[in-house]
Image (spheres, rainbow, N blue to C red):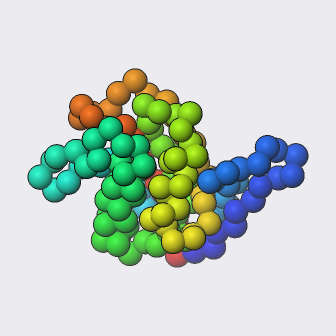
Amino acid sequence: MSRTLKNPEKLHPAPGFSHIAIASGSTWVHFAGQVALAPDFSVIGEGDLFVQTQAAMRNLQVAMEEAGVSWSDIVRRTVYTTLPTEFVVITEAIHSVTDGAEDPAQTIIGVTGLAVPGLLIEIECTAVLE
């Protein structure tokens, strides 16, 4: 897979994401949104956006490992959160899990709630492989 990330100088800075992700490859992997749920369906880090973001990213990483995908294969990330203006906290938590991987194209969407009470964030992504 080839992935090129770009941030045009004529657009605002992109803290924690890239404006453009250009990918080539033959296999697309779509990951369902992951949240801060433990295997017993309990909420991890209730009330703490940073901890919940880390937990969602770690759950996403489990799914990625199962599919043979690394962070550098991710070309699109969508974040659904009840706290959309807290993008600095979200970005810091994401970076704490992705070990310095470049950020793909991303959208943060504010929502009024998620499927399980107490959840603050859900993250889904798409990868492209050769």
Q: Residue furthest left?
A: 40
Residue at the (62%, 53%) spot, across then down: 16
Quarter that holds the N terminus: bottom right
The residue depicted at 52 percent of the width and 34 percent of the height is 84
- State the image coordinates of residue 115 (x, y, percent, origin top left): 27, 33
Residue 46 lies, with reference to residue 23, above or below; the image says: above
Q: How many marks?
A: 0
Of 27 and 30, the residue lying toward us: 30
Q: Is residue 84 visible?
A: yes
37 left or right of 50 in image = left
Q: Quadrant of residue 81?
A: top left
Residue 121: percent from the left, percent from the top? 39, 41
**Horizontal arrangement in the rendering, residue 116 relative to residue 77 (left or right):** left
Q: Residue extending furthest right?
A: 10
Q: Position of residue 11 (x, y in %)?
A: 82, 44
Q: Residue at x 69, y 67 (%)?
A: 4
Compared with residue 76, is residue 120 higher up or lower down, i.e. above or below?
above
In this rendering, the answer to whether 73 lies above or below 7 is below
**Residue 25 in sight here:** no
Along the line of sight, which residue is nearer the eye, 121 or 127?
Answer: 121
- Left/right placement of residue 81 relative to residue 108 reads left
On the picture, is 23 further left or further right than 125?
right
